[in-house]
Amino acid sequence: MINTLFALAATGLGLGASPLADPGHQHDWVLITDNEEGQAWRDTIWNGTFEQDGKQLELVLLRLNITIPNELMEADMVMAVDCSAGQLGIKEAYLHRSNFGSGVEAPIEQLSMDFADSPPSQSDRDIIEAACGETAE
């Protein structure tokens, strides 16, 4: 039974719908990173672009399960990705469970491309590659 539950979680089955997607959207959650900080799944069907300061940014929908002590969080995020600069920003966020509140949309006043570490961590690179493909820098 435990192995079945782990397999379901690893493939993204049963993750449910994201409130950041259109009603009725069918998700295809795929695990893109799993490490000591938590897991991230990408919805391979949901994508988009956003223009900021004359730059075209790729958008990806992620389900994050952050397990850092004292920062437990399950959230959906629409991440903006600057493929050429290797930068990430949060465009939209919904907190399923967190220390900051549960079942709430997190206000994002302005998209700031400062989410990724410098240089990007492996988790950041996993998100960038998911958005940009293997040609990401």
Image (spheres, rainbow, N blue to C red):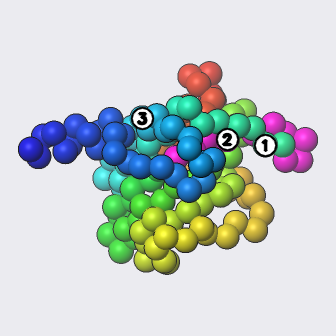
Label 2 near label 1: C-beta < 8 Å?
yes
Residue 72 belongs to the span the image colors magenta: no
Mark before the other along the chain sequence, 3 or 1: 3
Instruction: Identify the residue at the far left of this view.
Output: 1
Callout 3: SS: strand
* Residue 89 % position (x, y): 67, 53
Looking at the rendered image, the quarter that the C terminus falls into is top right
> Mark number for residue 129?
none
Give the residue pinned by disc 1.
50
Instruction: Identify the residue at the far front of this view.
Output: 24
Magenta-colored segment: predominant secondary structure = strand
Residue type (three-letter) at the residue carrying disc 1:
Phe
Residue shown at 61%/69% (left/top)? 106
Instruction: Identify the residue at the far right of this view.
Output: 54
Of 18 and 108, the residue lying toward us: 18
* Vertical side of 17 occupied by 134: above or below: above
Residue 31 in sight here: yes
Label 3 near label 2: C-beta < 8 Å?
no
> Mark number for residue 59?
2
Question: In the rendered image, which quarter is residue 14 located in?
Answer: top left
Callout 2: SS: strand
* Residue 5 % position (x, y): 19, 45
Residue type (three-letter) at the residue carrying disc 3:
Val
Tell me where the magenta segment starts and ends, as one range.
Answer: 52-62
Residue type (three-letter) at the residue carrying disc 2:
Leu
> Mark number for residue 30?
3
